[in-house]
Structures are given as structure tokens and as C-alpha cells.
Image: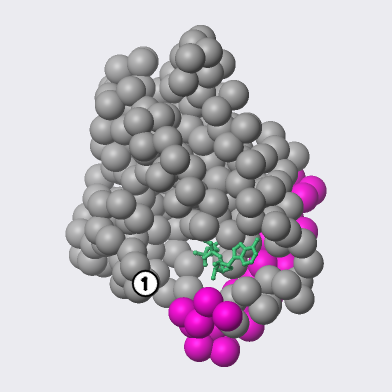
Amino acid sequence: MPGLRILKALPLKMISIPLLVISGPSGAGKSSLLDRLLSNHPKIFGFSADTTRSPRPGETDGRHYHFTNCADFESLRAQNHFIESTEFAGNLYGTSIGAVKDVADSGRMCVLDIDLMGVKQIESNPYVQSKRVLIKPPNPETLRRRLQKRGTEAPEAVEARLARARSELQSAEGSGIYDKVIVNSDLDLAYRELDEYSMSLYRLVNKRDHV
Ligand SMILES: Nc1ncnc2c1ncn2[C@@H]1O[C@H](COP(=O)(O)OP(=O)(O)OP(=O)(O)O)[C@@H](O)[C@H]1O
């Protein structure tokens, strides 16, 4: 199992803090919702993931992703440094054990933004606890419009993302691996649901009500 050897060596404290996993198809609104969560609660939640894709306009290194190159990514992956990793649309994405540990060491809960395959890797790893949230678009047509309006992909790439979204959603809904499903119709309402869920999880873990 990837990462098992290193995870075994990590302090129990780190792996006993559950990861808050946000997943859903491309364009469902994961980044929009996570951005709000992290801006509203910077001392409570922390995000860290590596990717070889180029930054989109407005994305900065360290805040949205750690932007890296293929050689460095593959080297880390070969050394089992990732809890989960995947390839999507020609780019590599992964969550490194070190990044999760850095967030946990700062007293924050680590939030992950990953695809369904990543969720399955995490769910089946006995050394990692997680709570898993599925973000769904209200319907395929809305998803198409949002991806087109975002304008970060060529039309063929949008179609590829939509095809993958269909199969991912089918598979996600039958998987039983999600603790919470949020339909992102109205962004403010979807955010409120995510905020409530995440904060109650944080309070439960920290057994404190004053945050
Ligand atoms: N509820 C909403 N109403 C209208 N537009 C939305 C809503 N949620 C997200 N969007 C817009 O839809 C687009 C896709 O959202 P976002 O980039 O957050 O999705 P994502 O799930 O992170 O996608 P990816 O996995 O490709 O990074 C963005 O342009 C965003 O501003």
C-alpha cells in the first residue's frame, strides 16, 4: 500500500487527526468552496497538495497548491511520500505525508481536494482517518456552463471533463464512501453547509466549543 511504511513511522498524533476530504468532479465547485473555508478559518483549516499543473490566474504557490515539476513529483512518489496521488488531464496531483504533518503540527485540520480515486486510496488506508465530503453540481448542464464560463480549458478538454464527471458521479454515489453530500446550486448555501459540517467536525475533534 503506498505510503504505509512511512505512515507507520509517523507519530500517532498526526494520523489520529482526521483529514477533511473534499471531492467531486471537475467544475463542481471544490476550489470555490475551499477557498472560502480557508479564508474564513485560516487558523483552523490548512490545505496542502502538490501538482504539476500550471497555476490558473489568481492561484499562488503554497496557498492553492504547491506547484512542482514532474521529475520532483515522481521522485517523491517513488519514495512513498504520498498518501494519495493521481493523474488528471495530463497533470499529476498528490498529498504528501510531510504536507499533512505540517498542517497537523500547526494545530489545524488538513483539508484535501481530491478526485474519487484519491478518496478510495485514503478510505482504504488503515493508518489515515478521514471524513469525506462529495460536492455535486445540481445537474450536468449547469456543470457544462460553469466549466465553459470558467474558461480555463479548451472546448475538447471541457467535454473530456464532463464525460469523466458523469462516470465519477455514478461511481461516487454507489460507493458509500462519503460521509456528507453537498449539492452546489447556490454557492452561499453550499458554503454554509460545508462550513457547518467542517466546524462541527473540528469541534468534535478538539472537544472545544469556543472557535
Ligand atoms: N454555485 C455556483 N454558482 C455559479 N458558479 C459557480 C458555483 N460554484 C462554482 N462556480 C463556478 O464554477 C466554476 C468551477 O468551480 P471550481 O473551479 O471551484 O470547481 P472545481 O471543482 O474546483 O474544479 P476543478 O476540479 O477543475 O479545479 C468556477 O468558475 C466557479 O466560479
Q: Is residue 99 above or below residue 44?
A: below
Residue 189 on image: x %, y % = 69, 48
**In terms of image quadrants, where is residue 175?**
top right
Between 97 and 67, which is closer to the camera in this rendering? Answer: 67
Residue type marked 1: Arg
- Left or right of 189 on screen, residue 58: left
Between 17 and 198, which is closer to the camera in this rendering? Answer: 198
Residue 131 on image: x %, y % = 58, 32
- Quarter of the figure that contains the N terminus: top left
Of helix, strand and loop, which one carries label 1? Answer: loop
Indicate which quadrant contains ligand 1.
Answer: bottom right
Q: Could you tell me which residue is drawn at 68 percent across and 34 percent down?
A: 179
Q: Which residues are magenta?
A: 149-175
Q: Is residue 116 above or below residue 205?
A: below
Residue, disc 1: 56
Between 99 and 41, which is closer to the camera in this rendering? Answer: 41
Q: Is residue 118 above or below residue 146?
A: above
